[in-house]
Image (spheres, grey):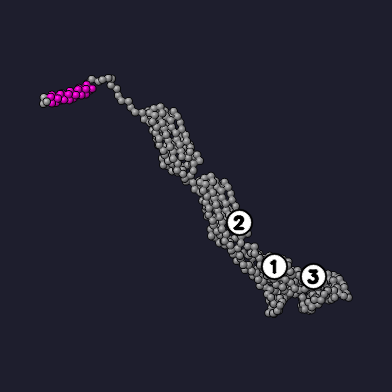
Amino acid sequence: MYMNDRKMNNYSVIRVGSVLVLAIALVLATFTFPLGTRTSATPLNSPPVFGNPSPVNGSTGNPVSFTWSIPINDTEGDTFNWTIQCSNGQTTSGTNASNGTKSLAFSDLAYSTSYKVWVNATDFYGSGLYTKEWYTFSTEVNLPPTFGTPTPGNGSTNNTLSLSWSIPINDTEGDLFSWTIQCSNGQTTSGTNASNGTKSLALSSLAYSTTYKVWVNATDPTGSGLYTKEWYNFTTEQEGILTVVITRPLENKFYLNDQEKSISLPGNTFIYGKITITANVSSETDVVRVEFYVDGKLKFNDTEAPYSYLWQPFIQFNGLSLKRTIKVIAYDSQGHNATAELNVTKWRFHALPFIVAGIAMASRLLLHTTVKGLFFNLKESRIAVSFYAIRAHYKTIGPFKSARGVINFKSCMGSILIGPMKLVRFGPFHKFAYGSFTILGEIHYNTGRLGQGILGNLLRNALSK
């Protein structure tokens, strides 16, 4: 049994050694004696490769219409199929394409938006492999229209009741826009497809001391689609205080030939002869004009202070009354007016004829003479009138007598003047007069023929004084 075990061990050693020898021989034979023809390894066929896109990945501020492109190349020059697809749904593709730049034209993109672009290229006839990548870009920001400073300014006061409210409206990108301007008084205006510039709203019939609100809206429908909305306010002016006071003549005063006398006449204003009517006008705005009226008739229009009018009318009755009404109306730049009135007694007669004139038809009941012509050195006193008639026509009328005639170069006298008197004075020292007047009674004159001698003496005496 021992011998058998020993034989078995020897056999195992021989067997293992044989295997080792055979293995070494095979290895050596492989390097020393090739089994067949030796060739090199076949290289790999690569998929297409992408260059840098335009615009670059992650770019911002891109326009809303442009062409996105990317170079695609196959290293082995194999033709390939490709696609470019954007997240906005636009896509393009090609088959059997060769190396070069591939592009996708974008249009009507949204402002201020990020987009993703997927690119795929497959080497269908080569390696059969594909390359797939994605890229991003963002479009430009499009701002809504902007507002400038309005006129009148926001929060301004003391504005007129009619004005043009305006504001500059501009779109930074130059897009056309729609706009509206509306005031809290209900007036409004608007425009569409408008370009940059000042827009305005004409306001009228506003109220005094009132605050108004103005809303402005501008929308960029062809650009950002956004709008700008603001509101502003302004306040109108206070109502101007306009007053007018007649300062001359005054109530309960007596005036003689434009001079105030120290006589008090309660309940009446008495004027004898001419009078300068004056008025004091007070206004918070500009005074445009001041009108002077007598008995409802416009006599004078004064545009500069001090405001006055010299009233020296021809003698006339206001019916059978000597009462007259003076009225002054002032106007300011805001269209306001103020009025002042004063009733006066306008007298141009002496006591006796005034009393007689108060009786109806006095001119028919009393003997009187009206003289009309060219006179020299006309003088008047309380009881008489004297003059030199160069050439005058006279007419005497009374209940029992009437006469008429012509007086040439005569020295004349008559009773008191009872009116009317209408004379224009001229020449040296205003000694000459032309016109007419009426005296009580008849006219008396020299019947002699003194002629030029008397005229010469009168002229010399008068002019030497």
Q: Nearer the viewer, residue 213 or 408?
A: 213
Report how far apart the C-alphas of labels 3 and 1 lie in the structure: 28 Å
Magenta-tinted stretch: 4-32
**In the rendered structure, are the residues bearing label 1 and label 2 in contact, judged by CB atoms less than 8 Å apart?**
no
* Residue 5 inside the magenta-drawn segment: yes
Q: Is residue 234 left or right of residue 445?
A: left
- For label 2, the residue is 186
Amino acid tagged 2: Gly
The tag earlier along the polypeptide, 1 or 2, is 2
> Mark 2, residues whose alpha carbon is within 10 Å: few (<14), some, or many (≥20)?
few
User: x, y (%) of residue 456?
Assistant: 78, 72
> Mark 1, residues whose alpha carbon is within 10 Å: few (<14), some, or many (≥20)?
many
Q: Is residue 307 above or below residue 48?
A: below
Q: Quadrant of the N terminus?
A: top left
Report how far apart the C-alphas of labels 3 and 2 lie in the structure: 67 Å
Of circles 1 and 2, which is in front? 2
Looking at the rendered structure, which numbered label has been put on residue 436?
3
Which type of secondary structure does the marked residue at label 3 adopt?
strand
User: x, y (%) of residue 341?
Assistant: 69, 71
Residue 376 in view (yes/no): no
- The answer to which quarter of the image holds residue 9 is top left
